[in-house]
Amino acid sequence: MQALVCQPAVAPQLFSAEGVVGVIFLLTVALVLTGAMIAVNSQRLAPVSAATVKLVVLAAALPLIPVVLTLVPFFDLVRWLFGKVV
């Protein structure tokens, strides 16, 4: 003869433990992707501004002026400039 085993009915649960872990994982992935998109959108093409580039070029060019003037005779340079203007 078989024994009849009665177990109380378990009420259906709205969220299982695996479901909650899955939802938390999906929310975490969504937040990471959103943060990455915000970080990419806030970056500029170059990490420095145009004013900084101009200052660096000016700072590099100023010491080179005497070098250029010694390579090209100053009088020939002035004559060439006035020849182009006049």
Image (cartoon, grey):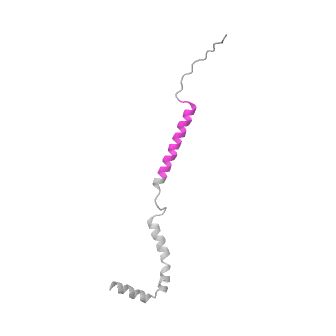
Query: At 53% from the left edge and 24% from the top edge, which residue is drawn?
Result: 12
Query: At 53% from the left edge and 42% from the top edge, which residue is drawn?
Result: 28
Query: At 51% from the left edge and 40% from the top edge, which residue is drawn?
Result: 27
In front of the other: 36 or 56: 36
Residue 73, x across and y down, in percent: 46, 88
What secondary structure predominates along the stretch shown in magenta? helix
Image quarter of the N terminus: top right
Residue 35, x across and y down, in percent: 50, 48
Q: Residue furthest left?
A: 86
Q: Seen in the image, is 6 located left or right of residue 65? A: right
Q: Residue furthest right?
A: 1
Q: Is residue 63 above or below residue 38?
A: below
Image quarter of the C terminus: bottom left
Q: Is residue 22 magenta?
A: yes
Query: At 48% from the left edge and 71% from the top edge, which residue is drawn?
Result: 56
Q: Is residue 83 above or below residue 56?
A: below
In this rendering, the count of numbered labels is 0
Residue 22, x across and y down, in percent: 55, 36
Magenta span of residues: 15-39
Residue 53, x across and y down, in percent: 46, 68
Q: Residue furthest top?
A: 1
Q: Residue furthest front?
A: 1
Location of residue 3 by image quarter = top right
Q: Is residue 68 above or below residue 41?
A: below
